[in-house]
Image (cartoon, coloured by chain):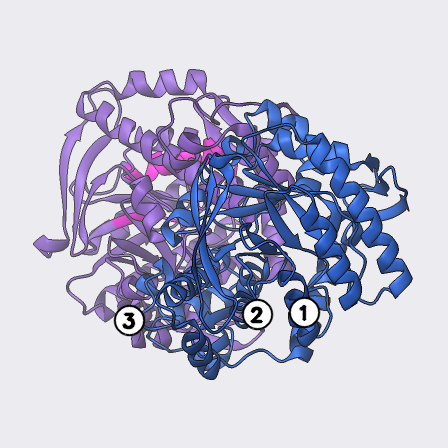
Chain colours: A blue, B purple
Amino acid sequence: MNEEIGFQLSNTCSSTRARTGVIFTSHGNVSTPVFCPVGSQATVKALTPEDLIDIEVKMILSNTYHLYLRPGIDTVKALGGLHRFMSWDKPILTDSGGYQIFSLAHLCKITDEGVFFRSHLDGSEHFITPELAIKYEEDLGADIIMAFDECPSHDSGVEQVQQATERTHRWAERCINAHIKNKQAIYGIVQGGMFPLLRRQSAQFISSLNFDGYAIGGLSLGEPKNITLDMTEETTQLLPVDKPRYLMGVGAPEDILECVARGVDIFDSALPTRVARNGAVFTRTGRQNITNARFERIDRAIEEGCDCYTCQHFSAAYLHHLFKSRELLAYRLATIHNLRFMMCLIDDIRLSIKQDRFACFRSDFLNNYETTSEEMRSQQKEKWLRARRATNM
Amino acid sequence: MNEEIGFQLSNTCSSTRARTGVIFTSHGNVSTPVFCPVGSQATVKALTPEDLIDIEVKMILSNTYHLYLRPGIDTVKALGGLHRFMSWDKPILTDSGGYQIFSLAHLCKITDEGVFFRSHLDGSEHFITPELAIKYEEDLGADIIMAFDECPSHDSGVEQVQQATERTHRWAERCINAHIKNKQAIYGIVQGGMFPLLRRQSAQFISSLNFDGYAIGGLSLGEPKNITLDMTEETTQLLPVDKPRYLMGVGAPEDILECVARGVDIFDSALPTRVARNGAVFTRTGRQNITNARFERIDRAIEEGCDCYTCQHFSAAYLHHLFKSRELLAYRLATIHNLRFMMCLIDDIRLSIKQDRFACFRSDFLNNYETTSEEMRSQQKEKWLRARRATNM
């Protein structure tokens, strides 16, 4: 392991598997647990890098698949790499494109060699191998890159999942062999679907390879939440203690608390930014829909005491007005608030672990926070996926 | 005239009618010539007040018509007035709603008493009189408010324009009589369509009333540019020298130069922000369309030497990518650039008048700046008007 891009474990909780640590990168250190906002197209939607710094975002996730299609890996490389292109000089993590190809692209054919697919933007044909994915991620120049995996849907049968998991394992070895950039950490991805045995086998196999960190893929795809938590627990128990663990695609406040308790260090999710653009703002008592008529004359911040730019300057009534008027500023102000909420939450989590009172913090938070029902979440996600497909975004 | 809300003339150009001055308001002083970005719905589209301050915007325009319909004058008043509602503590100018009713609303009936119309948002029925318009503007609390006028379209016949102009005169008197808030300046509006005689009559009549400033209305509505300039000149020649002159709705860089030369002090226009959201960015050589393929790998700012946030942090290639990807940040970054361009232009104009080299500055600027053709401008405006009607924005 390269010392400059390693991980150091700091504190562990005495009553859960929660832990704190530090990830070292050549763009600065990141304390864990950490939540990474999503900037698939080299921009966290509606925000500038300056906004992200004000919010105290420490690391963002971007997507090889999206950037490969537009503006193209060569273009980003010619413009000095992803950090320079988007004017963000803090750590970046890139997903390899595996999940996006399986969820967004029009999949044509998958073989051991790689994946042949059609772009969701223009139908153009492409072929990506594990080696090419790593090359693209190296060209983008993120601080942490992900292995190229096959991600089956949450309702796939055991045989299909087993096949995908085994292929993911073969690809993981090829990714490690292909990776040459030594200032860039590479993380392996555990698959295994919703099958505990396959999860454990995958965790053991991927852990046996010398990755700089280990990710849990193939979750938060629409399965019931208790399954997400069980699969996370099955996996983290078998991952090395001295390497960071990254749960891909998880980002609701309540889920982060539960998964930190199960030993996860890194999270990413588009949820806080996506729901913000639909008018759902986070508060310590749960999500509120700012377009609700009851906010029309509320002359207080969305959440009193919140130190974000939005809450420091604007009333809930003003935000309500902006959403009702479909003004662009609405999306930005709500996004700022939700991301700041996430940053404060993860800071509080980290501090509570350091002070060994995480279990209390978790139960206090969850007692106050009314979670969105499973049914509602799944409806919202389905609606968003449909809209995303319809607009080719 | 109230001294706190007055105007002081500073410099005059020796070869044109250009001049500099200062407008005093209870939210600070504004040097003229000044350009006011438009924030119809209590937000300059895509920007925060903090962005506007960075750009050095000195005064913005908002719209009584829009705010009356949504969120409602009472709501803005209950939330502390327009400045507090939108968190902008610098000067605000409000249009009375006259022009918007005639261009946006479904007009039902106009009488000397007032205007009966249907909302363009939901078809609801409303009746506004000059007295009510002034009451609404007082409740909003802008620093400068406009009299309620009747604004005929640019192709109206002489009889219709004469009738509208005479009604505007009767309404102007009623507006002055209705206005009671003494920290708020009230400006009269000259009409007269495209008829020099009516323009002169209107300028003389409106000037005879004791307004704090005088506006030129009913221009930039689709008429040929030479007519706009001629009508402006007809009007300014007859307006008092010691009061500010405001040309409503004019905002292309080349038009501002020509109209400053004809003695105008204040401009407002949605053009710089509207074209920005369509990817047209201002440079000293003319408007550029950033979505053009030739920007794909341009690793320089939109305009080298520009001190705006966008040019200081991002390449033209990145902005091109954001527009191609329809990312929200595109609209904000292009808006920042165009407004900063306008602020620098107006600063340069003001300085050149002070140093009595405005005529040279004007010809140098216009020699370098390729103006958008009349045909293209009129097509773009028509397209925008159609889109605005279609989306009820």
CA gap, disc 2 and disc 3: 47 Å
Check disc 1 and report the residue beneath it.
A228
Residue at horizontal 38 percent and vertical 42 percent from the top: B197
Disc 1 chain ID: A
Q: Is residue A1 above or below residue A214?
A: above
User: Residue A80: percent from the left, percent from the top?
Assistant: 54, 25
The numbered disc on residue B139 is 3
Q: Circle 2 sits on which residue? A: A255
The reply to whether callout 2 and callout 1 are in contact (CB within 8 Å) is yes
Rendered residue at 48%/73% (across/down): A290
Secondary structure beneath dot 2 equals helix
Image x and y of residue A390, in percent:
76, 56
The residues colored magenta run: B214-236
Vertical order, B113 against B32 (above or below): below
Q: Is residue B230 magenta?
A: yes
Mark 2 or 1, nearer chain start: 1
The amino acid pointed to by label 2 is Asp
Disc nearest the viewer among 2 and 3: 2
Distance CA(mark 1)–CA(mark 3): 54 Å
Q: CA distance from mark 2 to mark 1?
A: 9 Å
Q: Secondary structure at mark 1?
A: helix
